[in-house]
Every structure is written in C-alpha cells, then in structure tokens.
Image: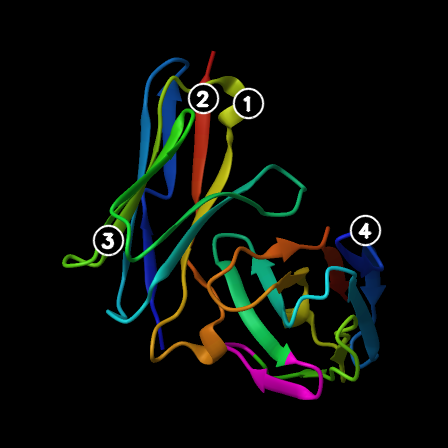
Amino acid sequence: GENVEQHPSTLSVQEGDSAVIKCTYSDSASNYFPWYKQELGKRPQLIIDIRSNVGEKKDQRIAVTLNKTAKHFSLHITETQPEDSAVYFCAASGGQNNAGNMLTFGGGTRLMVKP
Amino acid sequence: NAGVTQTPKFQVLKTGQSMTLQCAQDMNHEYMSWYRQDPGMGLRLIHYSVGAGITDQGEVPNGYNVSRSTTEDFPLRLLSAAPSQTSVYFCASALSSNYGYTFGSGTRLTVV
C-alpha cells in the first residue's frame, strides 16, 4: 500500500522564523495531499490541502508545494507564532494501492515555536 | 451540525473485556473510517467504509470489528481487549475520496 514518510520528527524555531516540513509518498497515482494540525489532547484539524493538478497553494501564512515527479510535498509556515506550536501530519490518498482511497498519514512533526 | 461525535471520551477496560466505541456524523458523508493513534506512530487505519453496508480492513484490523448499517453511524467493536489496544481512537468522515476528513474528538482507551 501507500507509504508516507515525514521529516523532521521535531522542529524548533524562533518566533517569526519560517518552518518547513517535508513528506514523501510511494504511490505515484496518489492525487490528494492534505495537512493536519493537532494540538495537545485535541483532534487533528485540516489546515490546507492540495490536489495533484496544482503545484502550489497558499492560505495566509501557510503554503503547500507538490512535486509529483519526485513524489514529495512540503508545508511552509511563515512568520511563525507560538500558537503554531502543535503536531503536524501530512497524508496522501487516491493511489492505486491505497485501501479504498483512505488517507495514509505520515508519522507527524512536532513543531515548537519559541517566543 | 454536530460534525463527528464519538463516545465515550475515556474508557478503561480489563483484558478480555469487549466494548463498542460509537461514532456518528450528521454531514451525510459517505466515507467513514477509524484510526488509532499511538505515541510516535502517527495515525493508522483500522477499518473503513465507503458507504452504508460496505466495510473493509485497513492497516491494523486485527482485534476489531465494524459495521455500517446507516450512513450516519460507524461503531467500532473491540472483541477481547488486550493491553496492546491501549491507544487514542479517532473516527473520521469525508464526503468522498480526496476530500478533507473531519475527525471526532477521540476516545482514550486504556486496557489493563
């Protein structure tokens, strides 16, 4: 089935700096790539997603880029703030080897923004 | 809309006991799924359903059963609880494939 790898597992940045989280996927037929933010003790919440017919998508301080040839996609957070501190998960779906087109998640990145 | 509702929020079971985790959504979503979240392991798919009457296994289905008799409900049954099933369980739903999931608030299960 699909395999999604996420790096780094932890990331510490100073407030105001940028943060980048990278994911790679194995199934070249995957076509949907969402990112979720999970605060401590809370449920994962969708923050941005991208489909394979688009190379980049932005929403205020958050952007996602997709490189289909290399099978990787990245989350970029600019001007980080303490409230950005959370665990971020990437995911992929739509591949031929993916159970029912369900999402396969990466292992998560714990982002810490220091004031 | 209540979104995705999970009950209970917390549960302690003894080894060998059985129980059902409830999940209901009021968004008329066809896709529903159960994930478990263990520290450092991300979210792993247990079972999923693409519509009423249709269920299938995910990555880690052993020890769990599901059914989907209605569009709204997707309960997860633990047949004989084991300590390895100690985890946080999330139910999620989506309109269809390639749409963002809405997650429930989770059930924290401890098996002793």
| Amino acid bearing label 4 | Ala
Residue interval drawn in magenta: B51-60
- Mark 2 — residue? A113
The span from disc 1 to disc 3 (Cα, nearest Å) is 26 Å
Residue A50 is tagged as none
Tag 3 near tag 4, CB within 8 Å: no
- Please check whether the numbered discs 3 and 4 fall on a single chain: no
**Crowd around label 2: few <14 · some 14–19 · many ≥20 (10 Å):** many
Which chain letter goes with mark 2?
A
| Amino acid bearing label 2 | Val
- Mark 1 — residue? A83
Q: Secondary structure at mark 4?
A: loop
B64 over B87 or under it: above or below: below
Viewer-nearest residue: A101 or A38: A101
A84 over B17 or under it: above or below: above
The span from disc 3 to disc 4 (Cα, nearest Å) is 35 Å
Q: Nearer the viewer, mark 1 or mark 3?
A: 3
Tag 4 near tag 2, CB within 8 Å: no
Name which residue lies at 30% across and 58% down: A52
